[in-house]
Image (cartoon, helix red, strand yellow):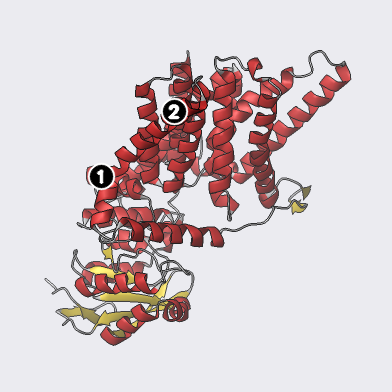
Amino acid sequence: MRIPGAAGVFAAVFAFRYLSYTGFPNDHFVYLARAQQLLLGAWPVRDFVDPGFLLMYFVSAAGLTVFGHNLVGEVLIVCGAFAAAAALTYTLSRAAAGSAAIAGFAVALQALAYPRSYSYPKLPLHALAIALCWSYLTRPTRARRIGLAALVAVASLFRPDHGVVIGLAAIVAIVWADGRPVAARAKTVLAFAGAAAAFLLPWVVFVQSTTGVAAYARSVLGFTRTKSEVGRMGWPSFGIGQGEGGPDLVIGQNAEAFLYYTFLLLPVAGAVVLFRRRAAAAPMPHAAGRLLVVAVLAACVNVTLLRNPLSNRLADVAVPQTILAAWLLPAAWRALRGSPPAARIALRAAVAAAVFMLTLSVLEFGQTRDRLEDIGRLSPGALAGRAASVTRALRDIPATLGVPGAERMAPAPLIAYLQECTDPDDRVMYVGYAPQTYFFARRGFAAGQVVFEGSYYTSPEEQELMLSRLRRERVPVVALPDENAADFRQKLGAVAAYIDANYERVGAIDLPGDRRGDVLLDRRRTAASVYSPLEWPCFVREE
C-alpha cells in the first residue's frame, strides 16, 4: 500500500509545483548562470567563484544540455526534486505515525509551504538522509555505512553545511546502533568519516591544483560568514493586523513567527518524549533511535538554515519537522490515557488548536490562494491547458521574460544589445545583482563573479583574482547601475580602477524598476558596426 501512496504523493506534488510555476526568483539564476558558465568551458574555482554549491551547477547544466537553452529542464528538476522529497517524507511519516491519513496531511502542508525553487536539493537530501539512517539502525552493515558516507559527500558538494548536518545525524545513527564499548564505536565513526573523505578526495585534489584548498576554504568560509551577518535575525514577534473582515491574527509576519517557533519547539518536544521513554508508543521498530536521528537533524537544520528573511528559509527545514509532527501528533493524542477526562480533553483541545493554527500559518506563508489562482480551474481540460501554457513559456525565452516572476526583472534592452553586439564566447560584467542577465543574453559573466553585491569577495586577494581573470577574458561590455556605482568604487577599488582605465561610457540604459545605469565599452576593442536601436558601437559585424 505504501508504494502506490508514495507514487500518488509524487504525482500530486509534481503537478502542483509545475502548474503553479510563474517564474524563478532572481536568486535561482545565480545557479543557472554558473551552469551556463560550465557549458561555456569554464570550471568552478579555477575560472569562477564557487561558494560550495558545485553539484547545483552540474545538475542545471545537465538540464540545459538535454532540453536546450530554456527553462524546461530546470523546472523539471525542481519539481521532480520536491516531489521525490514529498514521496519519501510521506513514507517516513507514515512509519512514524502509523497512519496514512496523518502522513498525507503532514506532507500536504510541507508541499503547500512552497519552498523556494533554488532550495530543491535540501528537502530530498534531508529525506534521503533520514531514510538511510533508519535503514542503518535496522541493520547496521558496512555497506549501509558506506552509503551514508556517500550521501554525506554528495550533500557536501551541493552545499558544505548540508554535509555537516547530515554527517552529524549519521553519526548519531552509527553510535546508537553500535552496542560495543565507546572505543569501538569511535573507531566505527572514524571509518565512516574516512569513507566520506575518500568520496570527496577527487574534488579536493582538483581544488588543490587550482587555487589551493586553503584559499578555497577561506573563500567559502568568508562567503558563509558574510551571509550569516546579512541574515542575522532577532526573535520574530507577533502582532494583530487588519484583514479585510477585521483584526487578523494569522497574516504575514504572524504566520512566519508561528512556524518559526513551532519548528524550534518540535525537536525539543521530540527529545522530551524520548527522554521520558515514550518512544515505544511509535508504531515502528527501533523507534527511539530513529526519532532521535530526526530530532537531531531538525535541530541542526534549524541552526544552519533559519535566518532572515524567513520568507525564503522556513520551508527549507520542512522534512524533519514534518516527520516529527507526524510522530508527535498521535503520541500527544494518546497521551494521558489513564488521566482524568478533563486533562485528556484539555490536551486534545490544545493539540487540535495547534494543528489548526499550523494549517492556517502554512496556507498563509505558502500563499496557497495565489498558487491556486495561478493554476486556475481544476477541470481536466483547464489543467491540460495550463500545463501547455507553462511549457510554452519555459521553452520560449522571450515569452518567459514576460511572465510574472523575477524574469521580468531582466534588463531587456541590455540583453538585446548583448545578443546582437557581442560574440557568444565574450564575457559581460554587470555590477550588481542581476544574474538572469547572463542567462537570457546567453553570455558568460566576467571576473569569475556572477554578482557584485555588498561585502562579498572584496578582500585585496579576491580583487587581485578578479583582475587576473579580467585580463585574460574578452569583456567588451560593463553595465554599471547608478545605485551601485558608489558602493562598487568603495569596496572594489582595484577592480573599479581597472574599469576606469580601460572602459569608456557609451550611454545610459533603462533598467527594471524605473532605474538607470551606464554602459561602458572596452576602449581597446574596435567596433565592427553600429547598433541602430541605440546608435552604439557593436562588436559584431551586421550581416
Mark sitting on residue 85 = none
In the rendered image, residue 243, in percent from the top left (x then y), is placed at 74, 51
Residue found at x 24% / y 66% = 419
In the rendered image, residue 165, in percent from the top left (x then y), is placed at 49, 40
Direction from residue 536 to residue 50 in the image, left or right: right
- Depth check: give the residue in front, 379 or 144: 144
Residue found at x 65% / y 45% = 260
390 w.r.t. 140: above or below: below
Three-letter code, disc 1 = Pro
217 w.r.t. 339: above or below: below
Direction from residue 178 to residue 149 in the image, left or right: left
Three-letter code, disc 2 = Phe
| Residue named by callout 2 | 10
Residue found at x 58% / y 53% = 307
Tell me where residue 465 sits by quadrant.
bottom left
Task: For mark 1, give the secondary structure.
Answer: helix
**Residue 72 appears in the rendering:** no
In the rendered image, residue 30, in percent from the top left (x then y), is placed at 38, 57
Residue found at x 55% / y 14% = 285
| Residue named by callout 1 | 202
**Residue 479 appears in the rendering:** yes
Task: For mark 2, give the secondary structure.
Answer: helix
